Amino acid sequence: MANSSCLRKPCKIVSYNLHGLNSGRSLLYDLCQDDEVAIIAVQEHWLSKDNLHQMNNVHDDFLSVGVSGMCNRLSSEIYMGRPFGGVGFLFRKHLAGKLDLVGSSDDGRCLIVSLKLSNTLCINIVNAYFPCADGSVKYRIELGNCLGFIESVISQNGSTIILGDMNFQCTDDSVGFGLCSPVFRQLDLYNCDTLCSAREQFTYHNEALNKSSFIDHIFVSRQIFQDCCNVDIIDSGCNLSDHRPIVAKFNFVLDLQARDPNYKASKCRILNWRWDKSDLSTYYEESRSCLSNISVIPTCTRCIDHMCYNYSHHVNIDHYYRDIMNAIHVAACKTVVRIPHKSLKPFWNEELDKLKQDYIFWYNVWASAGKPHQRILRNISISCKLKYKTAIRDAYSLFSLNKLMMML
């Protein structure tokens, strides 16, 4: 399969049910930090159509494409309650020229893109968020609509990856798996669950009920099944979702010319001023020093004409203004803390940082002890997680309320 013009390169494709973008953001960022992760399929981002751009702010090296699960509801009625649904892809920027949007289902449960890895290999990637498997007539209809959309778009002869939150286990007694199996067999798809090397074989965990299940899956075409070398499930203390990411590692064949190794994309770093983290007295002293070095042009102070039309006076005033602004900017650059704008959440505070670190610490302690059930370590870990999530929700609610009050 390989030849002299090609190079095998590891490539990870991830599926992650976020349970809301804010809940999954921390672990989503960590996944983007892995250099081998090329594409992340996310489910339940809970974003409306107007807010899909927020997925572009997760990481500087990733772009996104997505579809909302609330379009039909929002277009027909005033919506009340928590947001729901939606699927999307995050992909590395250098893949933008090789990735095309194929289509999405009307209900926002399926999104398909094609990825051209070489002149001979183009892969259709299907991100699926199937309905909850209760076996009802409504469930069968909704799942049938998803499968019908996939069949109408995907060719039997092409290479395909279907991944996502499918809400069923791959067992003979599963209604959802029974409905999907004929379609997947027709598309010549293989189940990658057998390649999973994770110690804990589940992708969903309900802490309140202490119930776990393997309901997130990856299916790949026979043509590329041999290129899937491993499947893993990520267990992390940063994860606030009730799902765990499932990761498939592929040895795809990439053209050497697919990306120039000497090319480095230029990055414009946008920084935010953090006055609350800075010593204002130092800034005041530095700005006084910078402003004192500005020379006042005598002609500007001596002119007594209130309707002055002297062009040279106007130019001198403009220079004077620019000198003042430059002095203030230089003083701020020397003394005021700045951070990347994408790392800034306007509602974030030191208390949330502390609660986050507490949760990660106690989760790691519990995990290193073998995750014992009905023990004090587990209870402490769950308690820290609930405190952290509640504090995030309260801080964001307070920020939104204050912002609304300022607008009134």
Image (cartoon, rainbow, N blue to C red):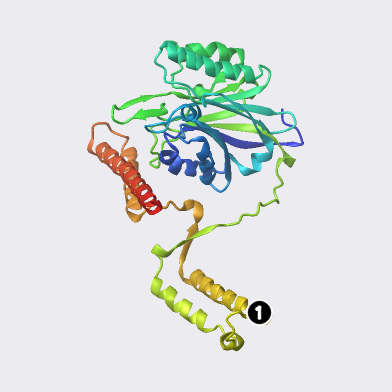
Using residue 361 as the reference point, say whether residue 335 is left or right of it.
right
Q: Residue furthest right?
A: 4
Relative image position of residue 340 (x, y in whole percent): 50, 56
Relative image position of residue 35 (x, y in whole percent): 57, 44
Relative image position of residue 117 (x, y in whole percent): 68, 33
Using residue 325 as the reference point, say whether residue 337 is left or right of it.
left
Q: Residue 373 versus residue 51: which sits nearer the camera?
A: 51
According to the picture, the residue beneath numbered tag 1 turns out to be 309
* Whether residue 40 is visible: no
* Whether residue 28 is visible: yes
The N terminus: image quadrant: top right
Q: Residue 351 versus residue 139: which sits nearer the camera?
A: 139
Quarter occupied by residue 11: top right
Residue at x 54% of width, y 42% of height: 53
Instruction: Give the residue type that dot 1 points to.
Output: Tyr
Q: At numbered mark 1, what does the secondary structure look like: helix, strand or loop?
A: loop
Mark 1 crowd level (few <14, some 14–19, many ≥20, 10 Å Cα): few
Quarter occupied by residue 389: top left
Relative image position of residue 242 (x, y in whole percent): 38, 32
Using residue 65 as the reference point, say whether residue 17 is left or right of it.
left
**Compared to 57, does 235 lie above or below?**
above
